[in-house]
Image (spheres, grey):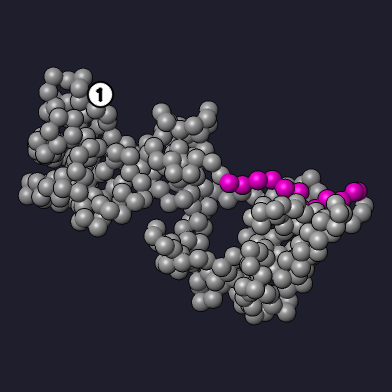
Amino acid sequence: MRRAQGFDGALAATRAAFLGGCSATSNVLAGKVFGIPVKGTHAHSWIMSFDEELEAFKAYAKALPNNCIFLVDTYDTLEGVKRAIEVGQWLRTQGHEMIGIRLDSGDLAYLSIEARKLLDNAGFPKAQIVATNDLDENIIQSLKEQGARINVWGVGTKLITAYDQPALGGVYKLAAIRDRGADWKYKVKVSEQALKVSNPGIQQVRRYKRNGEHIADVIYDEQADLKAGCVMVDPLDMTRQKRIAADTEFEDLLKPVFRNGNKVYELPKIAEIKERAQKSLQGFHSGVKRFVNPHQYPVGIEKSLYSLRTELILQARESVL
């Protein structure tokens, strides 16, 4: 909440992060508003407000005996782990169990490995090791490759602020318009840059599947007849075409929310949306999801829509000659 952008940025981005796969949030307000599970630890300031780290851990354990994840790197990380273990042993005498520790600085791979040894040797094999500190997918992947013994990844700034892509390269263009009682008039925006030429029509996106795996996404005009199958065209290279058989399994992705001014869609609960997102991701080949040199997933325009687009572009160009 400290770093999210905009007056509701923390709420909107927390909701999006949960739908995208995160399991919990430290944003208590988002937990209240959306029903997202709330998890968290204490801050360095908690430790520093006491004369000794051990005293701070004990006070925290007394206040929240069922939610003890100790932040151990305020002074010396491995010594902090040892003090957390000491308080964890005290918690057991009170009928409670330490959840784990949090690492927020330093060599997370090395420190997590050494912390795991200390915890296991002290009889805390189930204690979780939480890692934070400007994590992103690339750092997490690197830590896993280094054999880091981290169970929970706390991702904050680089997720909540869209750190690597702060602006979305999306624009609004008119695709079709009609007067009351008249037919649709399809519109196209022409540009010298192929990427900026818009697509006309009453558009829908159809995702084709085979044996549970997504094989292509096709933009088509809702008024087109695809009963005989579909030919997908690469909008940047019309010689690249893919034929999809009529009996191929498919799902139309865009769902109408309003029709003729009336609401026709009930928004699913947040847990259902999250489940759908995860199921959808599982349908993509692993090569599409890798970070380095990912395989290009086929996306294109249905052939009759592509032909209409080309016709409208030629008409637009002729009109200015």
In the image, taking residue 72 as reference, residue 308 lies left or right, namely right
| Count of marks placed on residues | 1
Spot occupied by residue 108 in the image (x, y as percentages of width and height): 21, 45
Q: Which residue is mark 1?
A: 45
Spot occupied by residue 162 in the image (x, y as percentages of width and height): 46, 41
Quadrant housing residue 300 = bottom right
**Residue drawn 52% across and 47% down?**
270
Tell me, yes or no, if residue 304 can be seen here: yes
Q: Nearer the viewer, residue 256 or 89?
A: 256
In the image, taking residue 174 as reference, residue 297 lies left or right, namely left
Quadrant of the rendering where the N terminus is positioned: top left
In the image, taking residue 31 as reference, residue 147 lies left or right, namely left
Spot occupied by residue 54 in the image (x, y as percentages of width and height): 12, 28
Q: Which residues are magenta?
A: 169-180
**Residue drawn 41% across and 28% down?**
2
Characterize the magenta stretch by its predominant secondary structure.
loop
Circle 1 SS class: helix
Residue 177 within the segment the image draws in magenta? yes
Tell me, yes or no, if residue 90 can be seen here: no
Spot occupied by residue 120 in the image (x, y as percentages of width and height): 11, 50
Question: Residue type at mark 1?
Answer: Ser
Quadrant of the rendering where the C terminus is positioned: bottom right
**Residue drawn 81% across and 56% down?**
317
**Is disc 1 surrounded by few (<14), some (14 to 19) or many (20+) residues within 10 Å?**
few
Residue 186 within the segment the image draws in magenta? no
**Looking at this rendering, what residue extends furthest in the front direction?**
321
**Residue drawn 25% across and 44% down?**
130
**Looking at this rendering, what residue extends furthest in the right direction?**
181
Q: Nearer the viewer, residue 257 or 109?
A: 109
126 lies above or below 162: below
